Amino acid sequence: MFDELESHARQAAPAGIDHWAVRGVSERSQRLLVRQNIAQSPSVTRDEGAMVTVIAGGGLGYAATSDTSAAGLKVAFARAQALARATAGRTVFDPGSLRMPSPQGRYDSEVIRDSAQMSLSDRIELLRAVSAATKVDDRIIDWQASLWTVHADQLHLTSDGARAEQHWQMLTPAIQATAQAHGVTQTRSSAGQYNGFCQQGGLEVIDRSGFRTDGPRVAQEAIELTLAPPCPSGTLDLVLMPDQMMLQIHESIGHPLELDRILGDERNFAGTSFVTLDMFGHYRYGSDLLNVSHDPQQAHEFAGFAFDDDGTGAQRQRIIEHGILQQPLGGAISQSRARALGFDLGGLATTRASSWNRAPIDRMSNLNVEPGDARFDQIIASIEHGVLMRTNCSWSIDDSRNKFQFGCEHGRMIRHGQLAEVVRNPNYRGISATFWRSLAMVGDASTFEVMGTPFCGKGEPSQVIRVGHAAPVCKFADVAVFGGA
C-alpha cells in the first residue's frame, strides 16, 4: 500500500487549506492457541487504510478510507474538509492556531530474529509442546498455550512535505493453567490472564518470556493455590511484583493523567479524573520515591515509537518527579484546549489511534515507574508482617480513577522479614490520590521488568490499543488487604 500512498495523497490533496496529514496503516496479525493439547483454529487478520486530517477555515476534520487510490483519498479529503468547515467557530479553541508537527524519520522495532522465519507448523508444534508440559497431573483441569504475532507499518505524510515511516513487530506468548482440588479451583498464568508479557521484537521475545519452559511452573503454582489458605484481611505492608505494578500504574496513574479525560472527553463513557488542571507542578501524587516516566524509547516495550499519530517526535519525559505531578499525558490538540482555559501545561508525544479508521486521542504509551536502589531481599527483610502479590486477575476502579480494588492470582505472606506461606485470592484496595504516597521502598534495576497489555480501551467510538508498563518491585506501607470470597 505504501508504495503509491504518497503520490496518491499529494495528488488528491486539495489546494487552499492550512494543513493536511495522511496516516496510512497496514497491520497483519496471527493468533494461535493450543488448548488441552488440541490446536484451535488460527485467527489471521489483515487491515489496511488511511486517515486524512484537514485544518482549514478555522476548523478541524477527519475522514478515513480503505480506498487509498488517488480517487479514494480525494473523497476522504473532501469529507474531512467539509467537517472542518462545519466545526469552524464551534470549538473551544482555534484549530487554525495549531502548529501541527512535521515528522521526518523512521522507526523500526529492534528485531533479532524476524517472527516470519518460523513456519505455522513449527509454531503449532511449539505450542503443543508447551501445552503438554503444562498438564503436570490430573488436578490440572484446563490448560492452554498461545502465541500472538503482529506486524504493523505506518506512513505519515503532511502538506509541508514531511514523511515518517514506522514499522513494528510484536509478540505475546502466554500460558494458562486451571487446577482443582478439594472443591477449590484456581487459575495461574505466565504473566496475567490478559497477556501481561507482550513486547516488541521477533522470535527472541519467546526466549525472553521463558515461554518454552514455563508451563510446569504455571501448573504447579495453580495446584499450590488450590491447597493454600485464603489471604487474610487487615492493614498490612504490601509488596507488588512488576506484573501487578503494571496494572497499578495503568489504572491509577495512566488513565487519570490523560489530558483529554481531565478536560472531560470521557465523562459519558469511561469517566473523568480526580486530577484537575491546577494540580500540575505542585501536587504531591506520591512519596519522594515515586518517579514516573513517559518513555517511548524503552527497549522492547510494547508501545515504543518515534512519532505519535499526530506526528509529534517522541522523547523520554518525567511526568511525576520525586512524587510531584509535573505534566499530563496530552498531545497537541489537548494542549491547545488547556491553553484556551488558561493552563499552559506542556505535553508529550502521546496521541495515538487504534487503527487507520480512528482519529488519534490522548493515550498512555510506555508509562514506567523508574527503579530505585533497594534489593529484593532488602525489601522483604524490612517487613514484619505483610503480603507479596503478583499477577493481576481482577480490577475495579471508580469513574474518576480514584477509589480502586484490585485482585491478584498469587499471594505470599511475609513474616519477620521472611517469605512465608502461599495464600490464594489476595486483594487490596486504596485511593489513587493517597495510595502512591505510601510507597516506602522501590526495587533496583535487578527487579525491573518490561510488561504491557494489548487491551487498553478508551474513546467513543471505542479504541482498544497497545500499552507498555515497566516497573521494579515496590513496597507500600499500611495497605488494606483482604481475601476473596
Image (cartoon, rainbow, N blue to C red):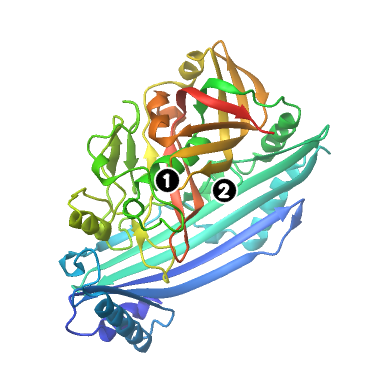
The residue sitting at the bottom extreme is 71
Residue nearest the viewer, comparing 414 with 26: 414
Residue 419 lies in what quarter of the image?
top right
Q: Amino acid at mark 2?
A: Asn
Counting from the top left corner in percent of width and height, residue 353 is at 40, 63
Residue 432 lies in what quarter of the image?
top left
For the residues labelled 2 and 1, the Cα–Cα distance comes to 25 Å
Count of picture labels: 2
Name the side, left or right, on which 309 lies relative to 197: left
Name the side, left or right, on which 22 lies relative to 345: right
Counting from the top left corner in percent of width and height, residue 396 is at 54, 43
- Which numbered marker is on residue 400? 1
* Residue name at image x 41 percent, y 77 percent: 1
* Residue name at image x 21 percent, y 48 percent: 345
- Which numbered marker is on residue 195? 2
Answer whether residue 292 is visible to the viewer in this image.
yes
Tell me if label 2 and label 1 are in contact, CB under 8 Å. Answer: no
Answer whether residue 312 is visible to the viewer in this image.
no
Kindly report which numbered mark, 2 or 1, lies closer to the viewer in this rendering.
1
Whichever of callouts 2 and 1 sits on the residue coming sooner in the sequence is 2
